[in-house]
Amino acid sequence: MWPDLINGSFELVGAYFTWRNWLQLRRDRTIAGVYWPTTAFFAAWGMWNLIYYPALGQWASFIGGVALVAGNVAWVVLVLTVKGETSEGLEGLAAYRYARRRLGFRVFWRCFFQDRITNLRSRFGR
């Protein structure tokens, strides 16, 4: 019984960190230095554990596994959503938010539109 409680505790702590990752991604809306298929793999493995733990009678591990799988799946869904949000890519969105906070409204918009105009002129040869 105690190995199940220990494993279930690890699953719950992992679930906390996974949901914390989800919250941070939701706030930042940027992905850097993360290979999302890794989390997708561990979500699939966690789904297998949801079948495996009850077969062994490990209910504490099952409860922790449910929370962990839910966090992993939610994170992967959010990553796929965030990846498709902007045509500029995620780096552009993060830079936009950072610059707007640091520069102030007027300076930011002047720089933002000047950059866009320069890009259009270089694209069309003017």
Image (cartoon, rainbow, N blue to C red):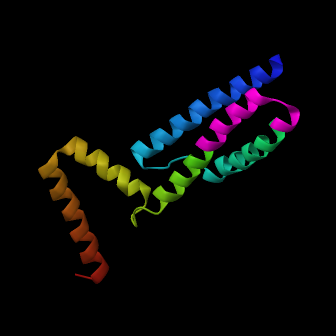
Residue furthest left as drawn = 106
Report whether residue 9 is seen: yes
Give left or right: position of 30 versus 37: left
The residue at the point 77 percent across, 29 percent down is: 59
Determine whether 29 is above or below 59 in the image: below
- Which residue is nearer to you in this view: 64 or 44? 64
Start-end of magenta stretch:
54-71
Q: Is residue 34 visible?
A: no
Report the residue at 66% width, 42% height from top.
69
Q: Is 121 or 96 nearer to us in this picture?
A: 96
At which x and y percent is residue 62? 74, 34
Q: Is residue 28 left or right of residue 36?
A: left
Residue 117 position in % (x across, y down): 21, 70
Image location (x, y in percent) of residue 70: 61, 43
Viewport quadrant of the C terminus: bottom left
User: On the image, which quarter does residue 61 sit in?
Assistant: top right
Q: Report the residue at 72% width, 50% height from top.
A: 44
**Residue 16 location, x and y as percent?**
57, 30
Left or right: where 98 falls relative to 109: right
Q: Is residue 109 above or below residue 117?
A: above
